[in-house]
Image (spheres, rainbow, N blue to C red):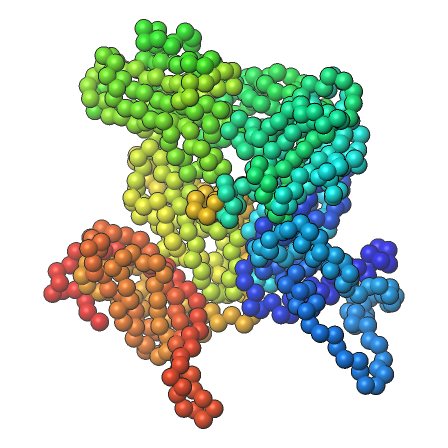
Amino acid sequence: MNQPLRWRTLISLAVLLAAVRCAAAQERPHVGYVYPAGVGVALGGAEIEVTVGGQHLGGVTGALVSGEGVKAMAVGYYDPEQARRRAASPPKKPAPKPMKKMNPFDSLAKELGLDDPPPKDSGPDLEAIVEAQRQLAVNKSQPNPQLAERVTLYVTVAPDAKPGVRELRLKTPAGVSNPVYFCVGTWQEYAEKEPNDRQPDGGVPDWMPLILNGQIMPGDVDRFRFRATKGTRLVAAASARALAPYLADAVPGWFQATMTLYDARGKKLVYEDDFRFQPDPILCYDVPRTADYILEIKDAIYRGREDFVYRIALGKVPFITGIFPLGGRVGGKSTVALAGWNLLSNQVTLDGADRSPGTMWFTMTAGRYVTNAVPFALDTLPECLEAEPNHERSRAQPLKLPIIVNGRIDRPGDRDIFRITGRAGSTVVAEVQARRLNSPLDSLLLLTDENDKLLAANDDHVDRSAALTTHQADSRLAFQLPKDGTYLLQLEDTQQKGGRAYAYRLRVGAPQPDFALRVVPSSITAPPGTTLPITVHALRRDGFDGDITLGLKGGSAGFALDGGWIPSGQDKVRLTLTMPPTPRRRPVGLTLEGQAVVEGQTVRRKAMPAENMMQAFIYRHLVLTKDWMVTVGGSRRSTNVAWRIVDGETVKLPAGGTARVRVSAARTPDMQQVQVELSDPPEGIAVRKVEAKGSQLSVWLGADGDNIKPGLKGNLIASAVRVYEIKDRDGKPTGNTRRVALGTLPAIPFEIVQTPAETAARP
């Protein structure tokens, strides 16, 4: 390592170590963006510095990147609030006597074995800080505390690192942050050079395809000048919303990018503000002559800030615009037709062997380049192709149930009609997969009898597992047939559109009860031995309404799960995870599994980690992540206590009565001063009384109110608080009290039972 870089790294480490020493009270870290949001390994391996913006990042000690071959090291931290405070403080008065100048890094250098003195300019670059603040003012950037702090990472990528989207998390003394997307690509990368709003950035290399990286600030427009050769099938594919799926404090809830292609004289050639129903625009253009062109990107309504980050794949980019069919059968091979730009083949064979039902994502190679990833559905049911003509009732295509039909609404105004037979009292489920598989179809399902009497209809059905699909345009209906006979099922586009891209998969048959699970948050931090609440969501399917038992799987030694169930009829439950008694040096990846009996068979499903993201101040989505990361550590000054529920069974809480729960503590506080408080309990359930005896508490729970009905089940999440009176120096009461949080208790499973009032327990 050369001298300047070595000393810059040393200075960064000094800042980081200093921040570690004062990070005891730091809140949970939050990451809002990473820029650039990716790196290319076209020439074999790569090294790059990236900036990560967020909040509560002080004391950052490193970063975690999912997958193999990518490592990141923290080399810098900047907090503008601290910089402003330093700038506002008056200069110190000169010392009255000459003093020997001390280099604050001497001791650290000696500790790290660096004997060479630092360069004269190795101190904090105040001029750079002032210039950065001035630039923010010029950009009219509104301060956003959630993005204000910045961490510089030095990222190295191995030559054999697998291309694709990774997840990047920061490690701090307060724990591991939420993940953000970071891309590993196969092309060269170029970062924008500001200013490029009036005059295009002319530094774009001649070799293409490449990736353009940039950020859009308020009112910003980024323009790039590049040269294209006649005959090139030019593609500019933007990733903006794909990098940050949801913004909590922005409408519509993401960076809505638009792209425009101009010739060198400024004539508009192509404009795109999306790709079909997807917000990120894809611009395609057959280049008529060799010349310079200008590509422009901006937000649709000229918003912008640090997390409006984008990547544009530009050049002769292989891009798949559609496939048919949209899925195939588990265990078999499927020949899939491809549509798109710059593809080497118009079809591919996909193998469903060793696959489970669900959605797989595939890419194609075009020379040394890789296409965009495309979803392909897999199922176990028999399949068939739609057979035209079937747009008239008299020509309805007969189906033998159960079946999955692969078809198209292949022209505007087209409709596909299918004939089914059923028995009285049986339930038929018809479900379309189209929008969830990147098809632009906005489906409508109609079920009629032989006399054309409408029995059931559905336009949009919400699938909570499709967290990135904000317009839930796929249809689903379930109908109990009134009599034996023939019925007609009609599928069309709500807007009467159509074309070769308007493909679908239509499942018709009896219900297939099942469930999927999501666990949030995806990053957890807690001191050893303590407990914290988590939430597990049940995504129930086709009428499954039974109990789901939850448990930790292999590799979870030392961890404990309490309240591990989702009662019948409920879609989510709060439960608790208790940490091992000793710290772990590294974050631990845990696995949670749910088990239920479905139609007489035991079914097990893995709980997929997710982030409960807010969109535009109100909407929430369970966005999948790759790993469920748990850090056993945190502040040494924590006042949390390791609590234990003495009575391990479900509490039978009488309607209109009370029940006792006994709690003990490993590190005994003054139990007489401890209060227990419930967190978001069902209306009518409350703590009636707390009694202390030795190292135990008896917590009396009461259940009253109109909503308290026998059969209600769930978990109660409670926390302990020490409340004591503040005294003055003379030991006299001041009349004020102080509250000290003592941590979360393990989840308390409960069930409301019917008990005569005279036999209900009383405190």
- Residue 385 lies left or right of residue 570; in this view the side is right
Image height check: is 369 above or below 659? above
Which residue is found at the position 40% from the left and 81% from the top? 736
In the orientation shown, which residue stands out farthest toward the bottom?
Answer: 730
Which residue is found at the position 23% from the left and 16% from the top? 453
Q: Which of 255 and 637 is in front in this view?
A: 255
The quarter in which the C terminus is drawn is bottom left
Q: Quadrant of residue 348?
A: top right
Image height check: is 500 above or below 670? above
The quarter in which the N terminus is drawn is bottom right
- Residue 677 lies left or right of residue 195; in this view the side is left
Which percent across, then down, holds residue 528? 51, 65
Image height check: is 333 above or below 12? above
- Residue 576 lies left or right of residue 637; in this view the side is left
Which residue is found at the position 45% from the left and 60% from the top? 532
Image height check: is 19 above or below 479? below
Which percent across, then down, holds residue 211? 71, 35
Q: In which quarter of the image is residue 598?
A: top left
For residue 607, say whether it is visible: no
Which residue is found at the position 67% from the left and 33% from the top? 296
For residue 113, say whether it is visible: yes
Q: How many numbered circles does the render carry? A: 0
Which percent across, then down, holds residue 61? 66, 59
Which percent across, then down, holds residue 245? 54, 41
